[in-house]
Amino acid sequence: MKKVIALILPLILFTSFASKDHETYLSVTEIEYDKHTQSLQIISRVFIDDLENVLSRRYQQDVSLSYKEDLKQNRELMQKYINKKLSIHVEGEAQKLKLLGSKFDADQVVMYIEAVEVGTFQKVKVENLILTDLFDAQKNIVHVKKGEKIESMLLAKGNSSQTVNF
């Protein structure tokens, strides 16, 4: 399954992130353990229009993420949303996730997130419900990297969490 995801991921990314009006609902989140800083470095990519839409609906306000200033202005809302929709448990312990910043990349928002004071581990549970409250067909690909080993998962509304062992 991991090899299939790794093979089709570039095709999906190029075709789904290419147009403004898309029919594929996909986010990609990469989680990497940094043993030197004992932290999880997380990068999550979502379509700008989808994130604007979900934040606007969830928090009953008009949210725009079209400009760099908008990302700064709505950082607190983005942090709130991440806290509700993305959770990581290391060895059964919930990690506090902090949105460090975000930027644009074509028609996506790239969010930089961190969890600090993470000791060495063998087991990580990830729950990713980002955008599943907006799109039933939303798929969230998650890659977890520890050292040279990478484990991948495909999460969706009915199957929103998975545990990987290293």
Image: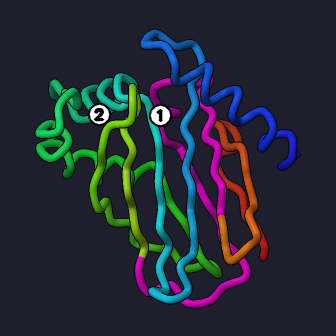
Spot occupied by residue 48 in the image (x, y as percentages of width and height): 35, 28
Tell whether 32 sits left or right of 76: right
Q: Mark 1 packing: few (<14 Cα in 10 Å), some, or many (20+)?
A: many
The disc label shown at residue 55, or none: 2
Residue designated by label 1: 131
For numbered disc 2, what is the local secondary structure? helix
Which residue is pictured at 64% across the width and 81% down the height? 91
Q: Which of the pair 84/25 is nearer the observer?
A: 25
Q: How many marks?
A: 2
Residue 166 in magenta? Answer: no
Give amino acid for label 1: Leu
Is the Cβ of the residue at disc 2 closer than 8 Å to that at disc 1?
A: no
Q: Which of the pair 7/65 is nearer the observer?
A: 7
In the rendered view, would you say 5 is above or below 2? above
Which of pointers 2 and 1 lies earlier in the amino acid sequence?
2
Spot occupied by residue 54 in the image (x, y as percentages of width and height): 35, 29
Which residue is pictured at 47% across the width and 31% down the height? 133
In the rendered view, would you say 13 is above or below 122? above
Which stretch appears magenta? 116-144
Give amino acid for label 2: Leu
Position of the N terminus by quadrant? top right
Which residue is pictured at 58% across the width and 21% down the height? 16
